[in-house]
Structure formats: C-alpha cells, structure tokens
Image (cartoon, rainbow, N blue to C red):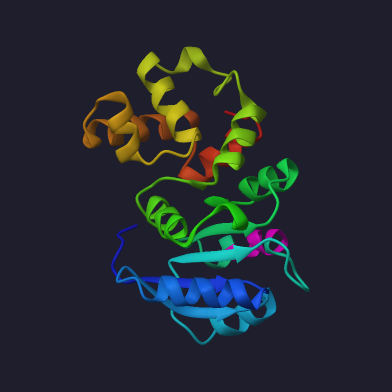
Amino acid sequence: MTTSFPIRLAIVEDDARVRELLCEYLGHQPEFTCIIVVDSIEALWEELGLSLVPRVILLDVSLPGQTGIQALPELKKRLPDSDIILQTMHDDPERIFQALRAGATGYVIKNATSLPQYKQAILDVLSGGAALSPSVARKALQHFQPRPTQQPELLSAREQEVLQALTEGLSEKQVAARLALSPDTVHTYVKRLYDKLKVRSRSELLSRAAKGDL
C-alpha cells in the first residue's frame, strides 16, 4: 500500500494522561495527523463511521468494555489496510502471541517506550517493519527459536537470514544494512519468502512465526 503523508492516526487509550501525551506529541509531528482520539473501542466504532480511515491505529490492550485484543479480528476485517500497534503496561507472552495471531503489526510497552520511540515505531511499521519493544521481541523470539521455519530445506541460507531478521522486527531497510545488501535485493528476498511460506503480509508472517507455524 502506498503511504501518503501526513499519516492518519487513531489513538484508542483509556488513560487520559497517556492519550493526551500521545495526541499532543504525535499530532505536532509533520508526518502525522491524529484524526481519531478516543477512550474505548465502542467510541472508535462510532468515530470510524464519521471519519476517514486511519492508516495506523495505536490501540490499548486493556480497555473498558471490549478490549483491544478482542476488537482486533473485527478491526482487521473492516480495515484491512490499517496497521494496528497494540500498547500495554505488561509484556505477558500469552497476550503478545494472541495479539500477533490476531493481526497486530506491533506491540509496545507503554512505560518502556518514549514518545520519540512511538514515532519511530509507527514509521518502522509504515516502512514494512514490525514495532516490537525489546522485551516483547525477546519473548517472541524465545517462543519459536531455534527454528524460525519448520521447512529449512525450502529456503536458501540467505532467505533464512532474511527471515530471521524479519521475525526480529527489522524493516527491509534495516535487514539490508545488517546483511550488506541493497534494499531492492532484500525486497526481492521478502517476496520470495512470502511466496514460499504462503503468507501475504508481514503481520501474517509474524503471526505464524509466533505460533511456530512457518
């Protein structure tokens, strides 16, 4: 999907202080515009009927009423082109894997993520990466290591290196830097991986990796 700026953001957060901080900071960045700022999923559904579609949704996990994780499947169904970054105070492994399986593109820990890091997380997602706080990335890796794929014979050594980097949350640009390849070459490898592993998106790749189902 082509990204056009400013990026339309939706913030769904029941903590008024966090909600205001995120809106104030991100709304003043030239890359973003906050089109929806609400305190519950129920309020989000109402606003979605009146607003443009957000490109990225910052979604709190623990909300009153319907929780962020409970809302994920329906959000992905209604907004297939929107990236959803879940945010929470806890890096509980079960919640992390549940969120990735449901289609979240990122998962960040609120008290371990600065405002500039929130901005970078959104930009990473837009460039094809995955926004994972370091502790979340470690837990995700521990879940499916040492085998990033159950079909190693299907992939070349270089493809396995690219896959490993992707499951660590790196963007294609970061993968290129790590492996000393051009971004175009990495993009070609990524397309091959999607084809060989029968996935259609980064979120599906991360979801299947979290389940050990590659």
Quarter occupied by residue 97: top right
Q: Nearer the viewer, residue 113 or 106?
A: 113
Asked if residue 141 is among those painted magenta in the image, a careful observer would answer no
The residue located at (43%, 18%) in the rendering is: 155
44, above or below 56, in the image: below
Quarter occupied by residue 111: bottom right
In the image: residue 92, left or right of residue 124:
right
Q: Furthest-bottom residue in view?
A: 50
Quarter occupied by residue 29: bottom left
In the image: residue 30, left or right of residue 17:
left
Q: Position of residue 48 (x, y in %)?
A: 54, 80
70, above or below 198, in the image: below
Q: Position of residue 61 (x, y in %)?
A: 68, 61
Q: Which residues are magenta?
A: 69-75
Q: Nearer the viewer, residue 2 or 144?
A: 144
State whether residue 196 appears in this view.
no
Q: Position of residue 190 (x, y in %)?
A: 36, 34
Asked if residue 72 is among those painted magenta in the image, a careful observer would answer yes
Q: Position of residue 96 (x, y in %)?
A: 67, 46
Q: Main secondary structure of the magenta part?
A: helix
The residue located at (50%, 34%) in the rendering is: 167
The residue located at (43%, 30%) in the rendering is: 165
The quadrant in which the C terminus is found is top right
